[in-house]
Amino acid sequence: MSALKWGLIGASDIAATRVIDAIRSSGGTVTGVFSGSSARAADFAATHGLGRATSNLDELLAWDVDAVYISSTNDKHFDQATRALRAGKHVLCEKPLALDAGEAEAMVQLAEDTGLVLAANHHLPGSPLHAKVRELVNDGVIGTVLSAKIAHAVLLPERLRGWRLGQGTPGSGVILDITCHDASVLNPLLGTPVAVSAVAVQQAAWNTGGQEDAAMTVIRYENNGQSPVLAQTHDSFTVGFAMTSLEVHGTKGTVQVFDAMTQDTQGEIVLTTESGARTIDVDCSEDLYLIGLRAFTAAVHGTGVPTATGRDGLMALKVALAAQESANSGRTVHIN
Ligand code: NDP
């Protein structure tokens, strides 16, 4: 499999801390970076050993690169992804894919029309923990699924307390940031999300931006005429001492995953049925972003599918947007 040549759109923290290493570990090379500021682009390129830097997106899109990784702020994803696809580049785009479901749908459609790969960089669905839970559920080990619960309450690192917290900043807030990730895990597990109810608040004294930093959400899923499934999520930037988790309850058993939602998981799965509780060993040693990069590379070569396809990213976005609308309006929001 020939290595992919990449361009980075966004001189971001996630590119610096995770994705450049993952690209290189997947066998790919990073040609250079685009930033809105030429000084930031040059600095980022120098720090990470990239040969080229530009503040002109068209210039990056003219480089000899196969794919771009978009990790700008959320409000820029749609425009940048669309331009990259039109320039013939495969696109790995950060979540949320866009700020509007219609725009995300248009991105997916454009990728399909041009025969290019568009994937959302949701790292959790590729986790061996979540793959094992999907396997247990699909094999009927816990019977008919009734409900699921995600605890994804974490403390937002100080260095990330910028645009995420700006009230009125497009793409800010805990729901687009974290609930979106939860949906990327729940959707492939539970079926079709059809209705969402959420409440969101601002809690942290350090959150001077005023945007919501904690939310609880309930999602109704439907699945081929079976009983509806309820899922509940707790997403927060404000909780410093909790372990993340996923629980899935069925008519014949419960699966619990501890440390289920973190970037560097040491997670554990416990399956409880009428035979008792047992731990299921899963190898969590591989970096989740590398798993995603490998899957993306295989998709480009026609030998695999991305960890989260463009359509998966779209569905995760729909849940997050419905949760945001519900939190804003105080009403249950239906997803068409
Ligand atoms: P950052 O704030 O680090 O970067 C986002 C953009 O902000 C950059 O592209 C850059 O714009 C600008 N920026 C960054 N630092 C500065 C600075 N010091 N001064 C001025 N501008 C700056 O965001 P994150 O890396 O946290 O998030 C980027 C994207 O990745 C988001 O879409 C987020 O949702 C997603 N994300 C995904 C994760 C995952 O696990 N899949 C985890 C974390 C984030 P420019 O490039 O124009 O310079």
Image (tube, rainbow, N blue to C red):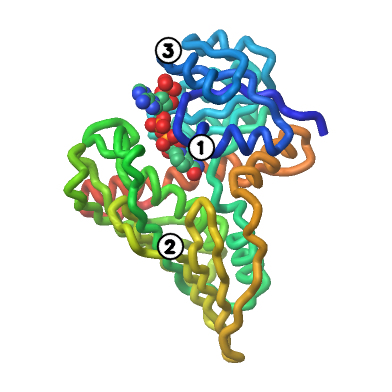
Q: Nearer the viewer, residue 90 or 51?
A: 51
Q: Is residue 168 left or right of residue 129?
A: left
Circle 1 residue: 17
Q: Is residue 206 above or below residue 136?
A: above
Give the Cα distance between marks 3 and 2. Answer: 38 Å
Q: Amino acid at mark 3?
A: Ala
Q: CA distance from mark 1 to mark 3?
A: 20 Å
Task: Note whether ligand 1 is within 8 Å of mark 1.
Answer: yes
Instruction: Say whether residue 174 is visible.
Output: yes
Residue 171, position as x, y percentages in the image: 34, 35
Residue 320 in the image: above or below residue 72: below
Which is more toward the observer, 151 or 105? 151
Q: Nearer the viewer, mark 1 or mark 2?
A: 1
Q: Is the residue at mark 2 in contact range of ligand 1, meaning its CB lies under 8 Å from it? A: no
SS label for mark 2:
loop
Ligand 1 position by quadrant:
top left
Mark 1 or mark 3, which has the lower sequence index?
1
* Left/right of residue 217 with respect to residue 16 in the rendered view: left
Label 2 near label 1: C-beta < 8 Å?
Answer: no
- Give the residue drawn at x 46%, y 62%: 221
Three-letter code, disc 1: Thr
Quadrant of the rendered structure where residue 142 is? bottom right
* 292 in relation to 4, above or below: below
Q: Which residue is mark 2?
A: 244
In the rendered structure, find residue 39 and report the number of the disc placed on it.
3
The quarter in which the N terminus is drawn is: top right
